């Protein structure tokens, strides 16, 4: 993790940038709504890069016109899960896409301990490598308390 | 003024052209459209003009940083059915949008069913979902008094009202709520929910239409569909309106629209009865007196069921 000192996890859009301000988040949501994508809010406390499916906060939100409504939900989620990773996702139901078109983090824990390198000796002299988040040493819900 | 003369107020000398402001906001256009397309409703139009003027002046004051608070814009529209509450609410959304008090200017019309859930824990997400959909626009709650059912203390409507109250207070910038319904029931509703009353700044009462106004409305409706009433039919129709008004379940413009739909049906049938005749353009567009006089209301002993 030499290229990413501070151990900030980098997933989704804008994750190499400084955290988005609420103003910037609103602008991104507005863009998604203009395109007719369904925006949802998700959270997790497992920072592993392969952890793709996060928990959805509340119901999925369709047919919204105004980004303030989603900001309301983000703030609710921040209040409920202050030390969690929270991301906003925009799903495009258009034919040919039918997939998330945007995903970016809007909340992260104050302290991110980063990852441990796990080496595995295999047959012959080959080595297997994987990473393990320090945070997942603790059980769910207690990781970033 | 003398007291303040030594400390110059910021922007005191800046003059602002009210006419220019009105022109750029394009509110005048909406107000004119309101005048043109809505017949009668004089008190309502006056009220809306006053509100628009207030909001425009408020916006000017804001430019000179004389007031910072967003004014309370929640409204209640009271009146009998078919008096144009929803239509005016649509226009109101447009006016508020042009003045910049709401961001997108759409109207979400709901009733109790859309807000109140069926079991414990269902109401809050349902109400919140509706509120989220309406954000940036106007939330129009028709027959709002059904939200409050005092005879059933476990009714979930109260929960919905509480969420609404909270949003009406905290998200004044994001959402304007318009409550609509019959006058007497709305009054009772406000009396039992003082919190709701105090959060609503504008109470607008919609009067019933006169028969002449209803005739003008029906002509307008027909013109939009490329129909017209013949002279005889016009006389018959005003007679129809007078009779219909005396019966129960009279819903002003809505009843008129239904009556017109039925007379169009009769006109089509009349044309169909004489198949070999060549039809002219005016045959297809004119509704004759007989199409109207065939209504049940003209029978000797009209049914008092309220069906038009």
Image (tube, coloured by chain):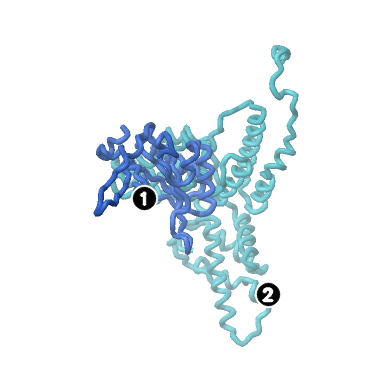
Chain colours: A blue, B cyan
> Looking at the rendering, in which quadrant would you find the N terminus of chain B?
top right
Tell which residue pokes out farthest to the front in this image: A125
Q: Residues within 10 Å of mark 2 (few under 14, many from 20)?
A: few
The chain ID associated with circle 2 is: B
Badge 2 marks a residue whose secondary structure is helix
- Lateral position of residue A85 relative to residue B199, left or right: left
The furthest residue to the bottom: B276
Q: Is residue B63 above or below residue B306?
A: above
Tag 2 residue: B282
For the residue carrying disc 1, how many other residues have a C-alpha within 10 Å: few (<14), some (14-19), or many (20+)? few
In the picture provided, is B160 more to the left or to the right than B215? left
Closer to the observer: label 2 or label 1?
Answer: 1
**Where is residue A91 shown, x and y percent of the image?**
45, 54
Residue at image coords 56%, 82%: B273
Q: Decide: is B3 above or below B262.
A: above
The numbered dot on residue B238 is none
Disc 1 is placed on an element classified as loop
User: Do the residues bearing badges 2 and 1 touch, measured as CB atoms within 8 Å?
Assistant: no
Residue B191 appears at what percent x and percent y? Answer: 42, 35
Q: In the rendered view, tell whether residue A8 sits above or below residue A92.
A: above
* Residue holding disc 1: A52
Residue sitting at 56 percent across and 46 percent down? B104
Q: Is residue B301 left or right of residue B204?
A: left
Residue drawn at 32 percent across, 39 percent down: A116
Image spot of residue A144 (x, y percent): 32, 34
Name the residue at 58% across, 74% down.
Answer: B267
Which chain is mark 1 on? A
């Amino acid at each position: 993790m030499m290229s990413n000192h501070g151990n900030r996890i980098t997933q989704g859009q804008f994750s190499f940038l400084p955290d988005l301000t609420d103003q910037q988040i609103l602008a991104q949501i507005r863009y998604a709504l203009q395109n007719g994508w369904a925006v949802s809010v998700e959270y997790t406390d497992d920072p592993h890069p392969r952890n793709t499916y996060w928990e959805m906060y509340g119901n999925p939100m369709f047919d919204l016109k105004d980004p303030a409504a989603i900001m309301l939900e983000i703030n609710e989620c921040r209040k409920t899960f202050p030390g969690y990773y929270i991301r906003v996702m925009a799903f495009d139901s258009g034919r040919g896409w039918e997939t998330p078109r945007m995903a970016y983090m809007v909340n992260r824990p104050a302290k991110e301990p980063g990852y441990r390198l796990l080496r595995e000796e295999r047959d012959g002299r080959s080595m297997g490598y994987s990473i393990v988040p320090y945070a997942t040493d603790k059980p769910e819900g207690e990781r970033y308390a | 003024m003398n007291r303040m003369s030594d400390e110059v107020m910021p922007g005191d000398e800046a003059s602002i052209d009210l006419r220019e402001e009105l022109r750029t906001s394009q509110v005048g256009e909406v107000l004119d459209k309101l005048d043109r397309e809505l017949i009668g409703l004089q008190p309502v139009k006056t009220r809306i003009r006053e509100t628009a003027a207030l909001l425009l002046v408020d916006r000017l004051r804001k430019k000179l940083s004389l007031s910072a608070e967003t004014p309370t814009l929640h409204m209640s529209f009271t009146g009998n059915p078919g008096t144009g509450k929803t239509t005016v609410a649509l226009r109101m959304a447009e006016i508020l949008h042009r003045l910049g008090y709401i961001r997108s200017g759409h109207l979400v019309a709901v009733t109790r069913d859309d807000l109140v859930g069926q079991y414990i824990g269902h109401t809050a997400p349902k109400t919140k979902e509706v509120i989220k959909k309406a954000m940036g626009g106007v939330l129009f709650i028709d027959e709002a008094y059904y939200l409050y059912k005092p005879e059933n203390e476990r009714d979930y409507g109260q929960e919905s009202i509480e969420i609404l109250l909270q949003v009406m207070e905290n998200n004044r910038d994001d959402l304007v709520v318009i409550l609509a319904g019959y006058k007497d029931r709305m009054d009772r509703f406000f009396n039992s929910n003082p919190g709701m009353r105090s959060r609503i700044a504008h109470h607008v009462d919609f009067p019933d239409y006169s028969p002449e106004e209803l005739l003008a409305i029906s002509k307008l409706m027909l013109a939009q569909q490329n129909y017209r009433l013949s002279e005889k039919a016009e006389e018959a129709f005003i007679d129809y309106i007078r009779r219909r008004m005396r019966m129960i379940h009279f819903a002003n413009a809505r009843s008129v629209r239904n009556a017109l739909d039925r007379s169009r049906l009769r006109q089509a049938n009349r044309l169909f009865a004489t198949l070999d005749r060549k039809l002219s353009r005016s045959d297809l567009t004119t509704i004759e007196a007989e199409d109207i006089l065939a209504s049940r209301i003209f029978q000797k002993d009209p049914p008092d069921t309220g069906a038009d």
